[in-house]
Image: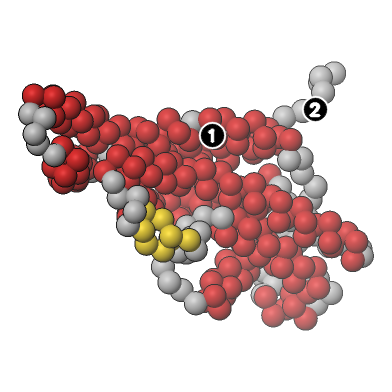
Amino acid sequence: MAPTLLDMATSGAGTSWLMVVGLLALRLAATLAMTPVLYAMPLPPSIRMLLLLGLSVALASSFPIPAEAFTGWGALLAAALAELALGATLGLGILLAFGAFSVAGQLLDLQLGFGIAQVLDPVTRRPVPILTSAFGYLSVMVFFLLNGHHALLRGIGYSLERFPVGAPWSIANAAEPLLKQATGLFSLGFALAAPVVFCILLVEFALGVVGRNLPQMNMFTMGIPVKILVGLIALSLWFAGIGGVMTRVYASITSTWDGIFVASTQPKGPVR
């Protein structure tokens, strides 16, 4: 019969199990702290900590516990720093994907003139324009609707197989996948807002022609409401076909994590 958590806590492996849970909680905290997954809903900090501990206990119970992994405070501190760095690296892959939505929102806010009106962003704790915040909430909502949180937990579980708790890992292997994702950040962000930007560009051309032929009209006063109206209508229509681009954005998380995991298993030299 498999030992229960109480048996493990009262046996000689109880200390090692508690260390594994604590280190795994550091990895989860560093991963989720850089993403809007936990901050999209106004949960108290104590609830977030209990959620992280619960996930850590569930994951630690599914993987083997090293018998004598940490023989001193120095080894434990090195393992904690390695877990924080690994969690931050994995979280950066998620943050870059959600950053594409921020790029799209800021681009539309600039084109429609919504940059003045700002609301509080729950992730960054700073004021952001309206459409930027709306794109952020939309990205989190669709992420949960597509069961992205299930894929996220599976990815964290798979990371325990590639990078056991407390094991050393090389950050150089993660540099190339993250740089590749960062280079595609602005292209994906522009793809999220490209049809709306194109409609606003056509409106700008039309207003320029009208202002050229009717100089007595105040185009600044008339142009702003027209651009806002056309932009919001185009954005509402674009939401019906934005799913394909959003899928590409979320897929960038999987490709980046796969690149990190595959790079960690490649041989460092020629095989003889």
Q: Secondary structure at mark 2?
A: loop
Q: CA distance from mark 1 to mark 2?
A: 23 Å
What residue would you read off at disc 1? 181
- Residue 154 locus on image (x, y percent): 53, 51
- Residue plotted at (77% across, 68% down): 19
| Residue 87 vertical placement versus 265 (above, below) | below
- Residue 22 appears in the figure: yes
- Residue plotted at (53% across, 72% down): 48
Q: Quadrant of residue 205?
A: top left
- Is 102 or 137 nearer to us in this picture? 102
Q: Which mark is residue 118?
A: none
- Is 177 or 221 nearer to us in this picture? 221
| Residue 120 vertical placement versus 261 (above, below) | below
Q: Quadrant of residue 242?
A: top left
Q: Residues within 10 Å of mark 1 (few under 14, many from 20)?
A: many
Q: Quadrant of the C terminus?
A: top right
Q: Residues within 10 Å of mark 2 (few under 14, many from 20)?
A: few
Q: Secondary structure at mark 1?
A: helix
- Residue 247 appears in the figure: no
User: In this rendering, would 16 be left or right of 26?
Assistant: right
User: In this rendering, would 145 be left or right of 205?
Assistant: right
- Name the amino acid, label 2: Lys
- Is 227 or 91 nearer to us in this picture? 227
- Residue plotted at (43% across, 60% down): 127
- Name the amino acid, label 1: Gln
- Residue plotted at (76% across, 40% down): 170
- Residue 222 locus on image (x, y percent): 13, 42
- Residue 179 locus on image (x, y percent): 60, 32
- Residue 97 locus on image (x, y percent): 48, 43
What residue would you read off at disc 2? 268
